[in-house]
Amino acid sequence: MDARQMKIEAARAALAHVESGMRLGIGTGSTAEEFARLLAEKVSAGLSIQGVPTSERTAKLCNELGVPLKSLDELPELDLTIDGADEVDGALTLIKGGGGALLREKIVAASSARMIVIADQSKVVETLGAFPLPIEVNPFGLASTRILIDRAASRLGLSGSLNLRQSGGDTFVTDGGHFIIDASFGRIPDAEALSSELNSIPGVVEHGLFIHMATLAIIAGPAGARTLQANNT
């Protein structure tokens, strides 16, 4: 299987967890989009769900596919969210935000009774951090916030470039009107400590460390899909 086929296999396996009548958070990114396409086929065949998208990009795709959507204000409590990840470790701690939707993804996941992560096997790591950590920041005081992020990282023995994300030659702007700093730490031995440090910085709106949120990961490889539970690969 090529990379896209593996994403489709993970998405197909996750679809087995979706039941009629569910209030469903629908993630953002290439793997989540494969899930949305498969979900649309089930909806067309009679599956009844109400979806809450984690980004404008996902909302646009679901509307095109005919997946019924509600806002999170209309459905503030969800049964299940299915979303991708940029990295996942053995404790099901995630790095997310490569697509720029980490704030809404985290809000939707936190509103859900369960979160299932779907990914191909290249996203499974022993220690998070090879993928740059997205940190969503307020445009006001950007230089100050970057300095505070660097100092917080240093207190934990972390270092690496802090790059303001660009898109088409301009600064990338999230659905919420914020910027993203991609932090290339290389290795994050203590995700909880880093999360706590980043949460204490006023200019940081949110970060891409998802801790104790995923209940199950479905990982696809050449041999098919397998489930990954906390500390059990």
Image (cartoon, helix red, strand yellow):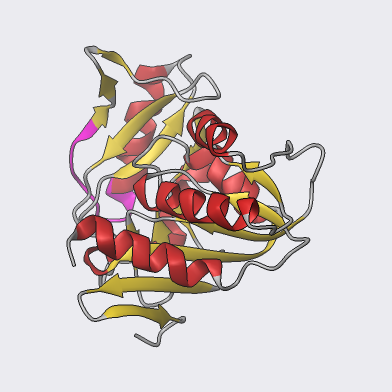
Judge from the rendering whether residue 190 lies leftward or rightward of residue 177; answer left or right. left
Q: Look at the image and say whether residue 196 sits in the magenta stretch.
A: no
Q: Residue furthest front?
A: 45
Which residue corresponds to the image point at 47% horizontal and 37% vertical from the top-left? 101
In front: 13, or 211? Answer: 13
Q: How many marks?
A: 0
Inspect this view and state whether residue 132 appears: yes
Q: Is residue 50 above or below residue 8?
A: above
Q: Does residue 25 appear left or right of residue 214 in this picture?
A: right
Residue 208, percent from left and from top: 43, 47
Q: Is residue 160 magenta?
A: yes
Q: Where is the C terminus found, in terms of image quarters?
A: bottom left
Q: Looking at the picture, how far across and down is residue 163, in whole percent?
A: 24, 29
Q: Nearer the viewer, residue 162 or 44?
A: 44
Q: Position of residue 41 (x, y in %)?
A: 54, 53
Rendered location of residue 181, percent (x, y): 33, 31
Give the magenta range.
154-162
Q: Is 150 situated left or right of 21 in this image?
A: left
- Residue 105 sits in which quadrant? top right
- Judging depth in this view, the residue of 99 and 69 nearest the camera is 69
Q: Is residue 119 above or below residue 63?
A: below
The vertical placement of 1 against 138, above or below, is below
| The N terminus - image quarter | bottom left
- Asked which quadrant contains residue 95, the reply is bottom left
Q: Main secondary structure of the magenta part?
A: loop
Visible residue check, residue 129: no
Q: Residue at x 25, y 55 (%)?
A: 4
Given the current orientation, which residue lies at the most extreme bottom position?
232
What residue appears at the point 74 percent right and 60 percent down from the top-left corner? 22
